Image (tube, rainbow, N blue to C red):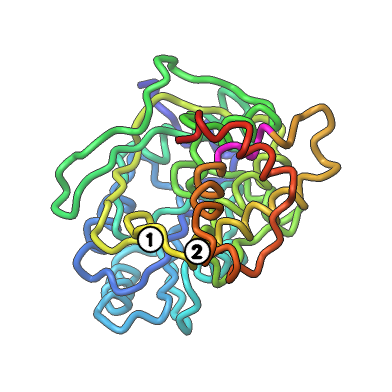
Amino acid sequence: MEALATRDVDSLMGVSIIIPIYNVEQYIEECLDSVIGQTYNEIEIILIDDGSTDRSGKIADRYALKDKRIKVIHKKNGGLSDARNAGVVIAKCDYIMFVDSDDYVDSTFVETALLKIKVHRADILCFRFMSVDDSGRTKISSKNTKHEYKTYSNIESMKDIFSIGGSLKVNAWNKIYKRSLFVDNSILYPVERVYEDNLTTYKLMYFAKKVVFIDKSLLLYRQRPGSITKNKLTAQNIKERIGMLSETIDWLDGKLTGLDIVKIQRIYRKTLLTVMMNEAVMKKQAYRIPAILFEIIKNNKRNAR
């Protein structure tokens, strides 16, 4: 890989790596070791201890004593979104990355990201990741596009994340963002919501001038038993998804000239099919479901199964 000298990224002012922490004493040292061991050193590491009740907060403080790039914030538990937001508010660098505290990153994570951002003038850089099990064994790699890189306009990137099998993914942690996307557009993660990435990523992409995907795995994503993404579909998170869909449609309305909003919502049709087939859930759910979506589901019911 082409070397990235410090002078090459001086104008970028480096990157703030935000790591929310909550009861992860079993994994946090592996995560922090991977971050402080980066081949590019000009980084700000923001650790948000979100009211941990185990040794996680003390481990974070110990690392801060060893590395002046680390800043630790101890706060009352407010959830993942609240912790990320606390990091965004105090971040100083021009670019932001999020790393979950039970995941870990490639040693060239920052160097590769900043180099590609400089080359492609990207506002958001997306990359592949490897899924690992609780013991760290590799399970699966995110989709390989067979292209070294691909560029997207803001609208093209939104089409991709709303498409089944897209390359960019909605996740917050397989991307690096220009900090101004958050600050200039008053974008924060919604607090006390289950699918916070789904309600935030498309907004950041909408305001980006260019989004770039690179075909390189830079992060190892740990899939732990009992995590949100492993939980079964329940009446409550079905209701969450319906509410998320309704909010998405409302936000997109009037912003996407020339883009078929109906098509961009098809990724949710399986969830809505589940809701339609469960009358008890339908009667209890408190969110508005746009009538047009029922027509989409009826017209695509066979293909959605």
Q: Which residues are magenta?
A: 263-267
Residue 100 magenta-highlighted: no
Left or right? Give the position of 132 relative to 115.
Answer: left
Query: 10 Å neighbourhood of mark 2: few (<14), some, or many (≥20)?
Result: some
Give 207 or 304, whichever is nearer the viewer. 304
Ranked by sequence position, the earlier of labels 1 and 2 is 2
Q: Which residue is mark 2?
A: 194
Q: Residue at x 35, y 58 (%)?
A: 232
Residue 266 colored in magenta in the image: yes
Percent x, y of residue 152: 63, 25
Q: Secondary structure at mark 1?
A: helix
Q: Are marks 1 and 2 in contact (CB under 8 Å)?
A: yes
Q: Quick one: quadrant of the C terminus?
A: top left
* Residue 62 appears anywhere in the view: yes
**Residue 115 visible, this angle:** no
Q: Which amino acid type corresponds to the residue marked 1 in the rendered image?
A: Ile
| Rendered location of residue 57, percent (x, y) | 32, 77
User: Within the image, what quadrant is residue 58 found in?
Assistant: bottom left
Observer-nearest of 233 and 40: 233
Q: In terms of secondary structure, where does tag 2 sit?
A: loop
- Residue beneath disc 1: 228
Answer above or below: position of 222 versus 55: above
Disc 1 crowd rating (10 Å Cα; few below 14, some 14-19, many 20+) is few
Q: What secondary structure characterizes most of the magenta part?
A: helix
The residue nearer to you, when weighing 289 against 95, is: 289
Q: Disc 1 and disc 2: Cα gap in Å?
A: 8 Å
Q: Give the residue displayed 50% in from the left and 58% down from the top.
A: 278
Which residue is at 53% across, 46% downward? 273
The spot of residue 167 in percent (x, y) is 48, 29
The amino acid beneath tag 2 is: Val
